[in-house]
Amino acid sequence: MGYPVFYSDKEAKNCMDSDEVVHRGLIDLFGDEAFIDNHLNKPFLAKKIFSDQSLIKKVNELVHPRVRARFEEWANEQSSSIIFNEAAILFETGAYKTFDAIILVTAPESLRIERVAHRDSISEVEVISRIKNQWSDEQKIPLANFIIDNDEKKGLLTQVEKIIEDLNVEISK
C-alpha cells in the first residue's frame, strides 16, 4: 500500500551474517560450526537454539539490540506519516512497548504450522518447537491495538484498509 516496512527478521539474519559483533558472539556461543563459508549455518543454529531456552535468550540478547538500533536509524530516514515494523517476536523482546500502535496478525495454529513447514521446508515437529518459544495469541491480543485474522476466510485487504484508515484518523487528530 506504499508505506515503508522494516522487516526485523530479515535484518536479524543480516546482522547474524554481517555484523561483526553479532558474528563473533555467535561463534563464542556455538563455535565455528555457527557459520559455513562465512554464512550462517541456519540448520545447525535452529537445532541448537530451539531446543534450549537459555540459548534463545542469549541469541536474542545479542541480536535484537542491533536490530532495534538499525530500525531506529531506518525510521529516522523515513518521511511517511505511517511506517511499519514487521517482527515475529516483537512481544517476546519487549519492543512492542516502543510503538504507537500494534497490529497483530493471527491464524489458527494448525494453519500456521502448515505455512511455516512449507515456507521453511522443515517438519511440523520443528515448527511446533519454534512456536513453543513464542508468546501465544492469548498473551498478545490484549496488547494489540488492531488484529488481522489471517485464517484464509476473511479478506486480508479489507482488514488492512480499515486499519490504515483508523491509523490515518488517529494521526490527523
Image (tube, rainbow, N blue to C red):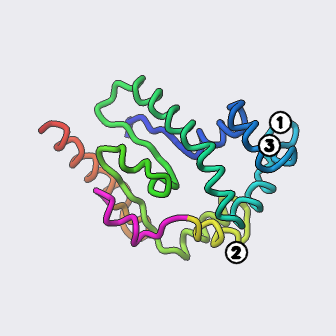
| 3 or 1: tag closer to the N-terminus | 3
Q: Are marks 2 and 3 in contact (CB under 8 Å)?
A: no
Which of labels 2 and 3 is toward the front?
A: 3
Left or right of 98? Residue 133 is: right
Q: CA distance from mark 2 to mark 1?
A: 29 Å
> In the image, which disc is placed on residue 138?
none
Badge 2: residue crowd in 10 Å (few <14, some 14–19, many ≥20): few
Q: Which residue is mark 3?
A: 27
Q: Quadrant of the C terminus?
A: top left
Badge 1: residue crowd in 10 Å (few <14, some 14–19, many ≥20): few
> Horizontal and vertical percent for residue 161?
29, 50
Three-letter amino acid code at disc 1? Asn
Left or right of 169? Residue 15 is: right
Q: Quadrant of the N terminus?
A: top left
| 2 or 1: tag closer to the N-terminus | 1
* Number of numbered labels in the structure image: 3
> Horizontal and vertical percent for residue 119?
65, 59
Q: Which residue is mark 1?
A: 38
Three-letter amino acid code at disc 3? Ile
What residue is drawn where x is 73% and y is 70%?
A: 123
> Horizontal and vertical percent for residue 97?
36, 49
Task: Give the magenta part as a residue range.
Answer: 134-146
Identify whether 100 is placed above or below 120: above
Q: Which residue is mark 2?
A: 125
> Horizontal and vertical percent for residue 34?
81, 47
| 2 or 3: tag closer to the N-terminus | 3
Tell whether position 101 is magenta. Answer: no
Q: Secondary structure at mark 3?
A: helix
Q: Are marks 2 and 1 in contact (CB under 8 Å)?
A: no
Badge 3: residue crowd in 10 Å (few <14, some 14–19, many ≥20): few
Three-letter amino acid code at disc 2? Val
Q: CA distance from mark 2 to mark 3?
A: 27 Å
